[in-house]
Image (cartoon, rainbow, N blue to C red):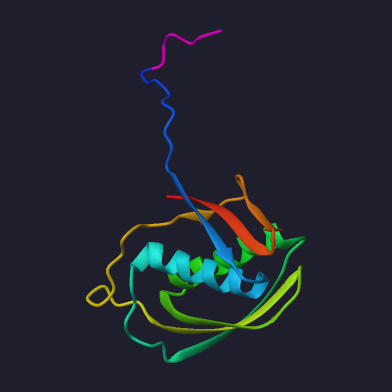
Amino acid sequence: MVDKSTDYLLLDHTADMGFEIKGSDQVNLFEKAGKALLHMMFGVISAKGTDLIKISLSGDDLSDLMVRWLTEILYLYEGEHLVTTDIIIDSFSSTTINATLSALPFDPLRHEILREIKAVTYHQIEVAEKDGIWKARVIFDL
């Protein structure tokens, strides 16, 4: 049943963007994914961070861990107003990641925002190894 009294029409709109990334192993893949997210948001960041932030995350599997990992990096910017400048993964398993991130305070005069990313989604998430190469596909809500 259609309600003819409404003053609006719902429109389908795709406000998503994603990337596919390759790595030599799982650690390399997660490091590259974090750096790719930052590059999508800020482009090249030339300054080195002075704050060291320790992150410990767990997930149900590699795909869940990837979403949580990228969400944490995104949260540092959105929630703490910190721009991550370097990523070092200290330890890794298929369900946990421990990393040290270098960051610096966001400065609108120094940091250009290329695109606002609202969220990392589970839509079409994929993290898998094929023929010796690790690959991930991640979609972001813009």
- Residue at far left of view: 109
Question: Is residue 42 in view from this perspective?
Answer: yes
Give 18 or 50, whichever is nearer the viewer. 18
Q: Is residue 34 left or right of residue 6?
A: right
Number of disc labels: 0
Report the residue at 42% width, 42% height from top: 15
- Residue at far bottom of view: 50
Q: Position of residue 21 (x, y in %)?
A: 53, 60
Give 25 or 139, whichever is nearer the viewer. 25
Q: Is residue 62 magenta?
A: no
Residue range corresponding to the magenta coloring: 1-6
Q: Main secondary structure of the magenta part?
A: loop
Looking at the image, residue 81 lies above or below residue 2: below
**Which quadrant of the view contains residue 22?**
bottom right
Q: Is residue 19 left or right of residue 11?
A: right
Report the residue at 65% width, 52% height from top: 126
Q: Position of residue 7 (x, y in %)?
A: 36, 18
Q: Position of residue 24 (x, y in %)?
A: 62, 71
Report the residue at 39% width, 20% height from top: 9
Give 126 or 81, whichever is nearer the viewer. 126
Question: Is residue 78 in view from this perspective?
Answer: no
Looking at the image, residue 1 lies above or below residue 105: above
Please identify the quadrant where the N terminus is shown: top right
Give 96 or 21, whichever is nearer the viewer. 21
Q: Is residue 2 magenta?
A: yes
Report the residue at 32% width, 82% height from top: 46
